[in-house]
Amino acid sequence: MHRSEFLKELKTLFPELTKTINKQEGLLSLEIDEFRKFTNYAVGNKDKNTVNLCYELAEKAYLTGNRELKALINTEFVEFLDLHHNEWAWEMLPVILKNLYLDFYGLTPQEQLKSKRTFG
């Protein structure tokens, strides 16, 4: 999956993001960051359907993406998900994305809270 394919799918799933994505001057890192912000907003609103769709797209982008897309899903999306007070959202996160999170932080979001080691 290349950037253009990812953005087409993102804008099809979430047309409300189109204007925001188009303002990012073609920089994939900023586009992924907007996608992550949108996902965190859905997590905060407990919108499980939207969160699930976001996770599915992120997982697909990671599994089938080119090198740049895969790297950015890891560093701009997964590492900055706000899951500390939303255990349900952690449980929904696909295993491959959980593993990326754990590779970076070493603890689940809930374990971070218990140990007072929050990172995000």
Image: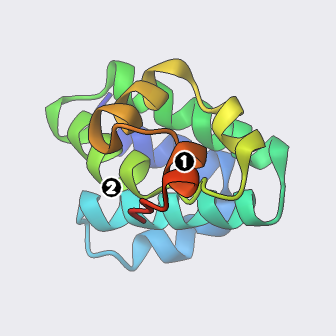
Q: Is residue 59 above or below residue 25?
A: above
Q: Amino acid at mark 2?
A: Glu
| Furthest residue toward front | 115
Of residue 60 and residue 106, the one placed in the foreground of this image is 106
Q: Which percent across, then down, holds residue 39?
A: 61, 57
1 or 2: tag closer to the N-terminus: 2
**Residue pointed to by mark 2:** 76
Q: Secondary structure at mark 1?
A: helix
Residue 75, percent across and down?
A: 27, 49
The picture places residue 58, in percent across and down from the top left corner, at 48, 37
Residue 32: name its quadrant.
bottom left
Give the quadrant of residue 33. bottom left
Rendered location of residue 111, percent (x, y): 54, 44
State the residue at coordinates (67%, 46%): 13
How busy is the neighbourhood of tag 1: few (under 14 within 10 Å), some, or many (20 plus)?
many
Q: Please state which amino acid type lies under the numbered disc 1.
A: Pro
- Which residue shows up at 62% across the image and 43% down it? 54
Report if the CB atoms under discs 1 and 2 are less than 8 Å apart: no
Q: Nearer the viewer, residue 14 or 51?
A: 51
Front of the two marks 1 and 2: 1
Q: Left or right: where does residue 105 sit relative to residue 17?
A: left
| Residue receiving disc 1 | 109
Total number of numbered discs in the rendering: 2
Report helix, strand or loop for mark 2.
helix
Q: Which image quarter is the C terminus in?
A: bottom left
Q: Is residue 48 above or below residue 14?
A: above
Whether residue 46 sits left or right of residue 28 in the image: it is right
